[in-house]
C-alpha cells in the first residue's frame, strides 16, 4: 500500500506518519529526514540539499526524485510505504506515478492534513526535535517531561535551523505556490481525503486511519 501524506510544514505529517506507519506496518519515508541525515554525514547530496533547505526552498526535483525512487526500491518498502513530505511538486508527483506504474503499482491514498497558516506559524516557532529518534515536541502544546530531553529515547532535543520566522514564512510560501497544486492533482484521481489537522494528536490519528480504512475519498472532519 502506498500512502502519501500531504500538508504544509508544521501540519503534523511527520508525527502522524510515524505512528500510522507503525500501526499499518508500512515503511515511513520522510525526504526531509533523508536530507538532514545526508547533511549530518557530510555527503555531497547533503551539502547540495543544505543550500536550499537553509533558505526554505525546495531541493531540485532531479535530486529529490532520484533519492526517493532509490529508497522506495529497498527491501523494507516491499509491503508499502507512507511518504511524508514527498511529492512536493507536480513534477515529483508525475515522476512517482510513472515509476510506480512501471512496476504495475499505484498510490492508494493521499491524506491531506489541513492546518491554518496562523496555527502553522505558532507550531513551527516552538518546535523542538529529538536528534536521535526525530520525535517532535512543542514548547507549549506538547513539551517533553524534562526540558531538552526526549521522553522516548532520552536523546537531545534541538531546534531546526529552518524553524526561524523568516525561513518559516518562506517555507509556507513555497507550500502554497508549489505543493498546494497537488491537492487538485490528487483530488482528480479520487484518492485524496482532506483531514482536519487541528485538535488532539489521537483524534487526528483516528481521522487519518478512518480515511485509510474507509478507502473513500472525501472530507473527514
Ligand atoms: P521537511 O522536513 O519535510 O519540512 O523538509 C525540510 C526541507 O527539506 C524542505 O524545506 C526542503 O528544503 C527539503 N525537502 C524535503 N522534502 C522535499 C521534497 N519532496 N522536494 C524538495 N525539497 C524537499
Image (cartoon, grey):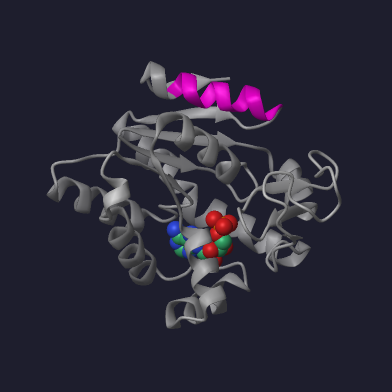
Q: In the image, is 173 to the left or to the right of 193?
A: right
Residue 95, image x, y percentages = 27, 56
| Location of residue 182 (image quadrant) | top left
Q: Is residue 21 magenta?
A: no
Residue 126, image x, y percentages = 80, 52
| Location of residue 143 (image quadrant) | top right
* Magenta span: 200-211
Residue at image x 36%, y 20%? 215
Provide the major secondary structure of the magenta segment.
helix
Residue 53, image x, y percentages = 58, 70
Quadrant of the frame with the N terminus: top left
**Image: 16 above or below 72:** above
Residue at image x 55%, y 79%? 51
Q: Is residue 204 magenta?
A: yes
Q: In the image, is 216 to the left or to the right of 12?
A: left
Residue at image x 20%, y 52%? 98
Amino acid at each position: 500500500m502506498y500512502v502519501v501524506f500531504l500538508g504544509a510544514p508544521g501540519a503534523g505529517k511527520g508525527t502522524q506518519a510515524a505512528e500510522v506507519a507503525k500501526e499499518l506496518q508500512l515503511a515511513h519515508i520522510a525526504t526531509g529526514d533523508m536530507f538532514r541525515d545526508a547533511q549530518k554525514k557530510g555527503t555531497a547530496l547533503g551539502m547540495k540539499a543544505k543550500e536550499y533547505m537553509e533558505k526554505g526552498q525546495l531541493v531540485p526535483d532531479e535530486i529529490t526524485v532520484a533519492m526517493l525512487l532509490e529508497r522506495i526500491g529497498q527491501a523494507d518498502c516491499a509491503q508499502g510505504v507512507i511518504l511524508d513530505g514527498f511529492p512536493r511538486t507536480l513534477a515529483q508527483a508525475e515522476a512517482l506515478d510513472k515509476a510506480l506504474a512501471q512496476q504495475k503499482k499505484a498510490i492508494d491514498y493521499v491524506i491531506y492534513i489541513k492546518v491554518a497558516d496562523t496555527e502553522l506559524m505558532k507550531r513551527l516557532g516552538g518546535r523542538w526535535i529529538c536528534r536521535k529518534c526525530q520525535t517532535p515536541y512543542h514548547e507549549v502544546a506538547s513539551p517533553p517531561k524534562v526540558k531538552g530531553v526526549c521522553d522516548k529515547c532520552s536523546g537531545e532535543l534541538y531546534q531546526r535551523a529552518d524553524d526561524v520566522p523568516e525561513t518559516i514564512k518562506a517555507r509556507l510560501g513555497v507550500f502554497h505556490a508549489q505543493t498546494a497544486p497537488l491537492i487538485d492533482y490528487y483530488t482528480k484521481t479520487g484518492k485524496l481525503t482532506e483531514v482536519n489537522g487541528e485538535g488532539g494528536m489521537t483524534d487526528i490519528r483516528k481521522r487519518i486511519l478512518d480515511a485509510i480504512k474507509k478507502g473513500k475519498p472525501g472530507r473527514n472532519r
